[in-house]
Structure formats: structure tokens, C-alpha cells
């Protein structure tokens, strides 16, 4: 199984033309609300994702 990392996600973002930025925070952000508080933004500005590998392909 291929291990995917942030560089793979960034490549997907770039290739798909998605306007997004990967952030690495110094605090745990297990929920959208926690991420919003950590970044001092509205929860609607947060996109959290889970990435799985299914049949050898990444699925978000």
C-alpha cells in the first residue's frame, strides 16, 4: 500500500485547481470548532478531511 502525505494532497489540490492551503497547526484540532478557534476564523471557513485508500486509490 502506498503511503500518502501532505505533498500528495498538495499535488491533488494543485492539479484540481482547488483554492486551498494546507495548514500545520501547533495545537490539536480534532474538530472543525477547535480548528476555527485555533485559527480565529468562523467554522464555515474550515474544511477538514479524512483520506482513505480504496482499491489502491485515494478517496477523500
Image (cartoon, helix red, strand yellow):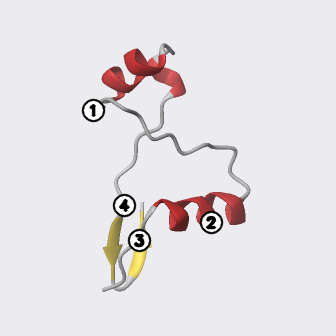
Residue closer to the observer: 41 or 56 = 41
Residue in the image at 31% along x and 29% along y: 27
Q: Which residue is mark 4?
A: 51
Q: Which residue is mark 3?
A: 4
Crowdedness near tag 4: few (<14), some (14–19) or many (≥20) residues, C-alpha within 10 Å: few
Marks 3/4: CA distance? Answer: 9 Å
Q: Is residue 26 found left or right of 14 in the rendered image?
A: left
Residue in the image at 41% along x and 34% along y: 25
Q: Callout 3: helix, strand or loop? A: loop
Quarter holding the C terminus? bottom left
Label 3 close to label 4 by CB (< 8 Å): yes
Q: Which residue is mark 1?
A: 28
Q: Callout 2: helix, strand or loop? A: helix
Label 3 close to label 2 by CB (< 8 Å): no
8 up-or-down from 28: above or below: below
Q: Callout 1: helix, strand or loop? A: loop
Marks 3, 4: nearer the viewer: 3
Marks 3/1: CA distance? Answer: 21 Å
Q: Among all residues in the image, which is located at the extreme right?
A: 17
Amino acid at each position: 500500500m502506498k503511503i500518502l502525505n501532505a505533498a500528495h494532497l498538495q499535488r491533488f489540490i494543485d492539479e484540481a485547481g482547488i483554492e486551498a492551503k494546507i495548514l500545520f497547526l501547533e495545537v490539536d484540532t480534532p474538530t472543525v470548532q477547535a480548528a476555527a478557534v485555533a485559527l480565529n476564523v468562523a467554522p464555515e471557513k474550515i474544511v477538514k478531511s479524512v483520506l482513505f485508500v480504496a482499491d489502491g486509490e485515494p478517496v477523500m
